[in-house]
Image (spheres, rainbow, N blue to C red):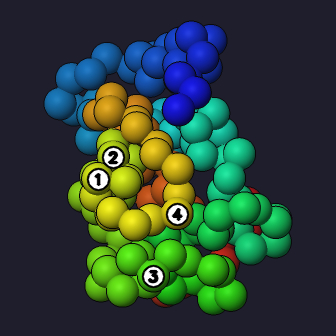
Amino acid sequence: MKPISNCTFLRAALLAATLPATAAWAESPVFEQVKVDAGATLFDAECRRCHATDAKHESYGPPLENVIGRAAGSYPDYDYSIALEASGIVWTKAALRAWMEDNSGFMPGTKMRHVGIADTTVQDFILAYLESITTRDGAEISK
């Protein structure tokens, strides 16, 4: 796995550090938006080379809009591994976190290369971004 560049990580960390990490700020909508913005930067660095966020943009992997709550291996017309299609997994935050940390360990037989994002803060930011592009009804998000 190509490591996150120091510049990309530093930019995301500085963005996230613009607010004090007190309990009140950690729950605020402003801090949530900072996490989403940092997550978008980290998604661009780590995930976008293979995944689009919506079906309008071609990508090697399945699009990740509305991934939270989606059954693994269920995006239409994508050629998933047999292991992923048969897994019965639903993409919860916990499952996505485990996938980001060690997808080949989490799902032996997957055809996706090893991700290896072990930093839980980076995972938190990417998950905040993925949640921001997930609707509860599966409708497209236009941004």
Q: Earlier in the sequence, mark 4 or mark 2?
A: 2
Q: Earlier in the sequence, mark 2 or mark 3?
A: 3
Q: Nearer the viewer, mark 2 or mark 3?
A: 3
Q: Which residue is mark 3?
A: 82
Label annotation for residue 105: 1
Above or below: residue 46 compared with residue 73: above
Q: Could you classify mark 1 by the number of other residues whose Cα lies within 10 Å: few (under 14), some (14-19), or many (20 or more)?
A: few
Question: What is the total number of numbered labels drawn onto the structure image?
Answer: 4
Above or below: residue 85 compared with residue 123: below
Q: CA distance from mark 4 to mark 2?
A: 13 Å
Q: Which residue is mark 2?
A: 102
Can residue 122 be seen here? The reply is yes
Q: Residue at x 30, y 85 (%)?
A: 88
* Amino acid type at mark 4: Lys
Q: CA distance from mark 2 to mark 3?
A: 18 Å
Q: CA distance from mark 4 to mark 3?
A: 9 Å
Q: Residue at x 68, y 87 (%)?
A: 77
Give the x, y percent position of residue 65: 59, 68
Above or below: residue 54 compared with residue 3: below
* Amino acid type at mark 2: Asp
Q: Which residue is mark 4?
A: 111
Q: Quadrant of residue 131?
A: bottom left
In front here: 133 or 79?
A: 79
* Amino acid type at mark 3: Ile
